[in-house]
Image (cartoon, rainbow, N blue to C red):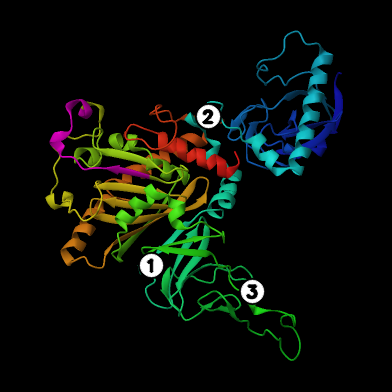
Amino acid sequence: MAWQRVASFREIGVDGVLGVDVNGSPVALYRLSNEVFATSGICTHALALLSEGFVEDGRIECPLHQGQFDIRSGKALCAPATEDLRTYAVKLEGDGVFIDMERRAASAPAMANAAPNRTAADRVRATEEDNQAGIGKIAAMNVDPELSLTKRYVWPTEGLTRIPDWVYTDQTIYEREIEKIFHGRTWNYVALECEVPKAGDFIRSNVGPTPVVVVRADDGSINVVENRCSHRAAEFCRELSGNAKEFVCPYHQWSYDLQGNLAGVPFRRGVNGKGGMPADFDNARHGLRRLNVTIHRGVVFASYVRDMESLQDYLGPEVLKEFEATFDGRKPRLLGYYRHTLPGNWKLYHENLKDPYHATLLHTFLVTFGLLVAGNRSLMLADATGRHGVMASAKSERKSVSSDAKKEMRAYRDGMTLAEPRFMDFIEEFDSPWSVTMATIWPNLIIQREMNTLGVRQIVPTGPHEFIMKWTMFGFEGDDDEMTRHRLRQGNLMGPAGFLGLEDNEAIKFVQDGMQHVPGGQHLVKLDPAVAAGTSDSLISEASIRAMYRHWRAEMGL
């Protein structure tokens, strides 16, 4: 096979792409100024047609998952694309564009692992077979989306000790997480009961990225409804919290009672016998979407699944014990909020609190003042499923930290003191051997008990590269003024600018940045090989992270 005329130069727009068929093989032609280049017409990652993609700065972006390739060399430039495109030699004669399917473009690097001594006919046959196989794969994937997913996203052969970057960076994976996890068989934290104490009290919240409203009805029940009018999908509740007798959508004034039932439709019967809703329109069938709700010791959870297991069964006995050590029967009292955005994938926050290894190295405050130190009595608990966890430690005195441990911990600052010595006072009030616990309740809740400062953190993902963190700080109704001041004082440990929170936020950003710019990357989680996945009594462990991804893969079908 030699040069073949495949298109007219004028057919290809400047900085544009044109798809052509050459002997049954899709080919993409690109025009950069007065030069024309040619590559295989199918993305090597998602098998989408590149002729439907976007050309910019000498690159073609796949329309399906935004993988990018260098047009001149075919080189894959960013995740999720990792395999280079095949390129073809191009020449122009008059208005004609000619390509040679046997020759690579002069600017393309040599093909890796090319078979030796292949004849021209062999190479042409291989090209045609590859492209036909690609077309067949596209057809199969259109028929079976699950096949498409499992073929595109392949876990490393090393198993749970390596995690591929697409877990954190891919839009399709993120959308599947919303479907399978946040809207799947999970209990999602939405509020503390003390935030809506009276009939009509409401607070805006989220289940995954989905906005919901938590409201106490006149009968005392707590309802969770989607913040989406059933008429034209407007978010009807605009205030973060308040008290209402009903909810009225600002767009067309459809109104709903505090249980989400549609109460009123303006001009439902039209005007002068004209317009209005159909005669068979039934208000009862057009209320707000209500979620399943459960409450345990003042903490409110919601689920899209009607036949969810009980919260107690969902947590399992060990995590439930730690949950009830913090929420010990006293009624929580609201102290205040923090709210901020983190530039990272939402799962990194779960990992951060299943990773006691970093806590002994990153956090100067933790190790210097003995809150979490290698050698402390400690536990990194994972429930039987691997989805929940508790990082726990018993506070040590500074003098008990060994000299060898100090050498390993660069964050340790011998001689550092506090201007306010009461900051580190620990008033024993819980039936627990631990002074510090961080419970991660899958998929969106962290329960924080750092000595006497208490809080819940709600994860709200907004995309694969960003999430919102909502912090709700609380005490108990029986606290006197001094205990409340003590909790607030110790609260400076936490929050977006806290002595600890600030460092975690930066570390999460660094990790996300690193994953976005290396195509096909994966990272290592091998610490504590004696524990394949699950609970460990060592702080130098990643076994709980491995357990979490064992569960994640099962839920995601990957």
Q: CA distance from mark 3 to mark 1?
A: 27 Å
Query: What stretch of residues is rendered in magenta?
Result: 390-406
Q: Which comes sooner in the sequence, label 3 or label 1?
A: 1
Rendering quarter of residue 119: top right
Q: Circle 1 is placed at which residue position?
A: 193
On the question of residue 234 being in view, the answer is yes
Query: Residue 159 has which mark?
Result: 2
On the question of residue 60 being in view, the answer is no
Number of numbered tags placed on the structure image: 3
Q: CA distance from mark 1 to mark 2?
A: 41 Å
Rendering quarter of residue 395: top left
Frontmost of labels 2 and 3 is 2
Pointer 1 with pointer 2, Cβ within 8 A: no
User: Vertical placement of 168 versus 405: above or below?
Assistant: below
Q: Position of residue 137 (x, y in %)?
A: 75, 34
Q: Nearer the viewer, residue 313 or 388?
A: 313
Pointer 2 with pointer 3, Cβ within 8 A: no
Tell me if residue 317 is in the magenta stretch.
Answer: no
**Which residue is at a point 18% across and 29% down the rendered structure image?**
402
Q: Which comes sooner in the sequence, label 1 or label 2?
A: 2
Picture quarter with the C terminus: top right
Frontmost of labels 3 and 1 is 1
Tell me if residue 397 is in the magenta stretch.
Answer: yes
- Amino acid type at circle 2 is Gly
Q: Circle 3 is placed at which residue position?
A: 286
**Which residue is at a point 38% across and 39% down the rendered structure image?**
507
Q: Secondary structure at mark 1?
A: helix
- Amino acid type at circle 1 is Glu
**Which residue is at a point 52% across and 64% down the rendered structure image?**
292
Q: Position of residue 382 (x, y in %)?
A: 40, 42
Classify mark 3: residues with Cα within 10 Å, few (<14), some (14-19) or many (20+).
some
